[in-house]
Amino acid sequence: MDKQIAESIAKSAEVILSLNEQRDTIQAICHEIVGALKNGNKILTAGHGGSAAEALHMSEELVGRFMGDRIPLPSICLVSDGPLLTCIANDYGFDALFPRQLQAHGKPGDVLVMFTTSGNGKNFVDSVNYANQNGIKTIAISGKTGGDIKDQTTHQLIVKSHETARVQEAHTLLMHIVLEAVERAFPPVN
């Protein structure tokens, strides 16, 4: 058991350290999100399963607070409304979950941030297509190979791992780095 714990910690550290190779991409993502918020646009977040929790985490930190007591910032998590999700899935199918909400809420200049360990899913592909045709910037924070949305988004960061747990651990760090950039751009009011 102790050996397995040590191996998990070592693998996680290795994946986290590999993010250093993508600092330019991380900086571009931070710039895109901060710029959208400074222009009065909103951040839309999406994900499946554990990645849905990461999407929700990011939106709540923007609207609520992260480290300091700053102004609330506009963000909508596309997985946070259970009745809406079941309505869309029942009436239009699961593949319409994100695209339909993006059509309702997304405006030119907004940013869609997709957390996905695989980068796969028709609702991601359709959301990216809609966003690209309607002036909405897209950010894919993924893992494995980047999946179906690889090279289709405004920015993509592919975590160098095929293990879901390691990818999600890196996603949490990336989200916190973005939130730190937001806090620097929107300092606490007190």
Image (spheres, rainbow, N blue to C red):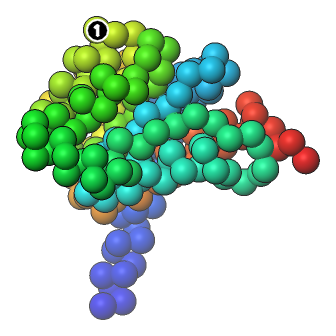
- From this viewpoint, which residue is outermost toward the right? 190
Mark 1: amino acid: Gln
Q: Position of residue 93 (x, y in %)?
A: 8, 40
Foreground residue among 6 and 72: 72
Determine if residue 159 is in view: no
Foreground residue among 89 and 158: 89
Q: Position of residue 99 (x, y in %)?
A: 24, 29
The residue that disc 1 covers is 133
Q: Position of residue 127 (x, y in %)?
A: 25, 26
Residue at the image point whose x is 59% and y is 50% from the top: 61
Asked which quadrant contains residue 150, the reply is: top left
Residue at the image point whose x is 77% and y is 51% from the top: 68
Q: Is residue 81 above or below residue 43?
A: below
Residue at the image point whose x is 48% and y is 54% from the top: 57
Left or right: where 160 falls relative to 58: left
Q: Is residue 66 above or below residue 104?
A: below
Foreground residue among 138 and 73: 73
Q: Secondary structure at mark 1?
A: helix
Q: Is residue 38 above or below residue 66?
A: above
Residue at the image point whose x is 30% and y is 91% from the top: 1
